[in-house]
Amino acid sequence: MIRNQQLSRAFAAIAAGGSLLGLSVIGASPVVAQVAADNPGAVANPEIEAGATLSIAPLRVDLDSDATGATVYLTNSSARELAVQTRLFGWSQDAGNDVYAPSGELTVSPSISMIPPGETQIVRILRKSGSSAGEKRFRLVVDQLPDPKSAEGGRAETRIRFTLPVFVDRDTAGTPALAWRLADDKLEVVNSGGATARIVSLAVKTANGKDVTVGRNVLRYVHGNSTIAWPIGKGCSLGAVTIIAQVEGQTVDAQPQTTCG
């Protein structure tokens, strides 16, 4: 599937790519659209170049303690060949912020793929060592690499980035345990459990039923033994509020503890 000339082009394209810290940023030019992190299901702007279509399955990888590896499928439904790069990074949280760093605990193969039109590339994620107690978190970053022909011709190119969560040994970590706190200018959620919780929606209402604006980027993950926060106007001056959230497929209705002062 991979030819030497195409590989040379693909590796040259890596040097022009975006940085790790900005996972939703794809830096090669000319790029006029992109897919942000945690929104892997859609083409950024298919009207710009209807042929630039890459899909991926599954959208989340769970590598349980009895498994040695997992498989991800990349499908090119466009009319032209696509160059794709796959990388794995360790994923942690520090003071509520996501932190990504190179990791040698897993391998991903192949790292560079040339996917012909209408075909599917199998990508394998493998352990380098045995399982251990406690959940470990990674991100699989899949980048569509720039097409040299588009760059040479000055043609606008739609490229896609996926950032998939990869959880290893999650089955040994127990369950999430969330507690909500309202501070002066933020709403916090503390996960004292061992497993990561995925929060896909969040609404805050006052005692009289008025909606409270929560900062952008509601879709969040909170790792075990970690805390994340959203900015919230007025904070403790809102009085008693109710939290309605979708967490791991379930509706959570809670009243946060007030921690002001």
Image (cartoon, grey):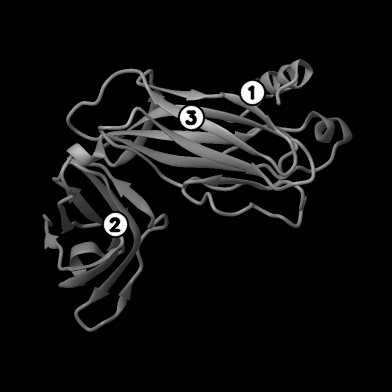
- Residue closer to the observer: 200 or 235: 200
| Amino acid type indicated by mark 3 | Arg
Q: Position of residue 214 (x, y in %)?
A: 35, 63
- Among all residues in the image, which is located at the extreme bottom? 208
Q: Quadrant of the C terminus?
A: bottom left
Check disc 2 and give the amino acid type. Answer: Glu
Q: CA distance from mark 1 to mark 3?
A: 20 Å
Q: Is residue 122 left or right of residue 11?
A: left
Picture quadrant of residue 202: bottom left
Which image quadrant: the N terminus? top right
Q: Tell me residue 226's x, y (percent).
A: 21, 41
Q: Is residue 12 visible?
A: yes
Question: Label 2's element?
Answer: loop
Residue 248 shows which numbered tag? 2
Q: CA distance from mark 3 to mark 2?
A: 26 Å
- Real-space CA distance between mark 2 and mark 1, rounded to the nearest whole angstrom: 35 Å
For badge 1, the amino acid type reads Ile
Dot placed on the residue nearer the N-terminal end, 1 or 3: 1
In the image, is residue 141 above or below residue 189? above
Q: Residues within 10 Å of mark 2 (few under 14, many from 20)?
A: some
Under circle 1, the secondary element is: helix
Question: Residue drawn 44% across and 29% down?
Answer: 125
Asked if residue 20 can be seen in this view, the reply is no
On residue 48, the disc is: none
Asked whether the residues under the numbered discs 2 and 1 touch, taking CB atoms below 8 Å apart as contact, a structural biologist would say no
How many neighbours does mark 1 have within 10 angstroms: few (below 14), some (14-19), or many (20 or more)?
some
Q: Position of residue 8 (x, y in %)?
A: 73, 16
Q: Mark 3 highlights which residue?
A: 124
| Image-quadrant location for residue 155 | top right
Q: Quadrant of residue 219?
A: bottom left
| Residue at the spot of label 1 | 14
Image mark count? 3
